[in-house]
Amino acid sequence: MGVLNLTPDSFSDGGRWPDTDAAIAHAMAMIDDGVDLLDLGAESTRPGAPTVPVDLELSRLAPVIKALVDCGRPLSVDTRKPQVMRAVLDLGVDMINDVSGFADPQAIAAVSASQAACCVMHMRGEPLTMQQDPVYRDVVSEVCQMLAERAAALQAEGIDRSRIVIDPGIGFGKALEHNLALLADLPSLVALGWPVLVGVSRKSMLGALTGRAVDRRLPASLAAMLAAVAGGAQIVRVHDVPETVDALCVWRAISDARQSIDDMRGKK
Ligand code: HH2
């Protein structure tokens, strides 16, 4: 999943694609580089980010969605607002990525009236305040419980489980130790039975571990991405598509070789 941020203030690429043409060109470059799915966002959710009015969020999204709706890749929209969800679903997007995990019943109503996929992410609190001393007793089981409850709430409103993806929400109301625990114990999330999406690209936990500024976190992002895939993540949300595609290509070749060795030895 390639990130297409249409914001002036996203934590790593705010203002990078300042107009519709630049955003479309970046989307096309990600497609050429092998992206499977595009995630469009028009409101930053970085720690401390203010909310954006519905009209502004939609004015950033609509022209880009209209230009990309037939681009040959599914479009996801990263939004927490039911009004925005309804409008972008009318424009034909394929997935709603709600970092608040469809906490608003109106958000569930918006997606249940469509056939779109739903990414249910775990967040503690709101972006404005979420990093103020987050505390968990057992972060993995608390995140699993919340995700299972929210996914069940979607299914209760008629959304088939095959339309649901879950996400631990790396960096959303979590300290470094919580993010590490979630990445280390991703198989517990996978065991819930929904495909797992992980977004760790360029995030501050990588800066905390390496001491690198946000524009120098590519190697750390690739390492964390591969750890997520090793833990069973089926979708990885990234800013650096060509580098991620190369890393996954090598990873898959080695995994396939491992499988061949296991098959050969199993047959003997
Ligand atoms: N992370 C960000 C935004 N949306 N959605 C999901 N499902 N999972 C994530 O981990 C996730 C997300 C933050 O990254 P970015 O979009 O680059 O930054 P900003 O929110 O500042 O625009």
Image (cartoon, rainbow, N blue to C red):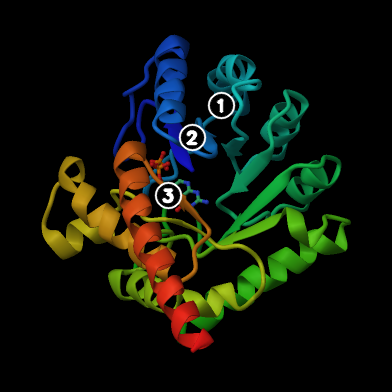
Task: Kindly identify which residue carries mark 1.
Answer: 57
Secondary structure of residue under mark 1: helix
Q: Is residue 121 above or below residue 241?
A: below
Residue in view at x 47 percent, y 17 percent: 24
Residue in view at x 20 percent, y 52 percent: 219
Label 2 beta carbon less than 8 Å to ligand 1? yes
Q: Position of residue 18 (x, y in %)?
A: 37, 16
Q: Residue 43: which disc? A: 2
Q: Residues within 10 Å of mark 3 (few under 14, many from 20)?
A: some
Residue in view at x 39 percent, y 45 percent: 238
Between the C-alphas of marks 1 and 2, the distance is: 7 Å
Q: Residues within 10 Å of mark 1 (few under 14, many from 20)?
A: some
Q: Residue 128: which disc? A: 3
The reply to whether discs 2 and 3 touch (Cβ–Cβ < 8 Å) is: no
Q: Position of residue 158 (x, y in %)?
A: 88, 56
Is residue 18 in view from this perspective? yes
